[in-house]
């Protein structure tokens, strides 16, 4: 009996080490690799003269990608729980305004790059251990409360709104001096 308990504890310990060390590093590298790929695609668009390097839409999207690259290590499942400060201006408004001045095809390509960046971030957040624990806990509590009834529409809407808000939190965090150095190194 004691041997079974010790083996179970060792198995959970090994699983914890695997998740917290190896899987975390892999997820971070995979996210950064995807962001570098998207930033390169944006650069190729500007190099091919589809959009000017000085265009605000190019500069804003490149800056957003650089911020995500510099802060990728801070993007975790806990971001689902963070509330954005209300006093910081949302840079999304300037992004949408800058897109209005571009040709349709270029605008669609830039929106596609931003969409793929957001999808990479959502996937990164969804497969984090903390998020999995939050989701599993929510599912279990819902099943207990509702006797396994299917989730209501407002629950899905709430989760979708929380994911969108969590991604926007990263744009609203003021850049610190050390992040400026990281942006210069990455950008």
Image (cartoon, grey):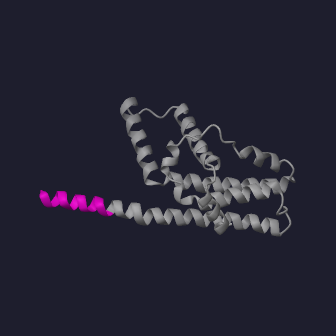
Give coordinates of residue 139: x percent, y percent: 42, 40
Q: Quadrant of residue 54?
A: bottom right
Which residue lies at the image location 79% right of the left edge and 65% below the top edge? 45
Res. 180 image quadrant: bottom right
Q: Residue furthest front?
A: 177
The residue that appears at 59% across and 41% down in the rendered structure is: 84
Is residue 3 part of the magenta span, yes or no?
A: yes
35 versus 88 height, above or below: below
Magenta: main secondary structure equals helix
Q: Please report the bounds of the magenta region as a residue range.
A: 1-14
Q: Is residue 134 left or right of residue 32?
A: left
Name the foreground residue: 127 vs 152.
127
* Magenta residue check for 149: no
> Residue 29 at what x, y percent from top left?
54, 66
Coordinates of residue 10 in the picture (x, y in percent): 25, 62
Which quadrant of the rendered structure holds the C terminus? bottom right
């Amino acid at each position: 009996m004691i041997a079974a308990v010790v083996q179970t504890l060792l198995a959970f310990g090994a699983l914890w080490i695997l998740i917290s060390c190896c899987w975390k590093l892999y997820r971070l590298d995979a996210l950064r690799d995807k962001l570098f790929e998207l930033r390169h695609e944006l650069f190729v668009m500007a190099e091919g003269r589809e959009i000017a390097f000085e265009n605000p839409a190019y500069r804003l999207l490149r800056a957003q990608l650089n911020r995500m690259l510099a802060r990728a290590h801070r993007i975790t499942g806990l971001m689902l729980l963070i509330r954005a400060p209300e006093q910081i201006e949302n840079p999304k408004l300037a992004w949408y305004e800058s897109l209005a001045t571009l040709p349709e095809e270029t605008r669609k390509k830039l929106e596609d790059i931003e969409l793929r960046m957001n999808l990479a971030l959502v996937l990164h957040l969804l497969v984090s251990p903390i998020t999995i624990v939050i989701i599993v806990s929510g599912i279990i509590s819902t099943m207990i409360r509702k006797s396994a009834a299917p989730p209501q529409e407002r629950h899905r809407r709430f989760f979708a709104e929380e994911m969108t808000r969590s991604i926007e939190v990263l744009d609203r965090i003021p850049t610190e001096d050390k992040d400026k150095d990281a942006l210069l190194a990455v950008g």
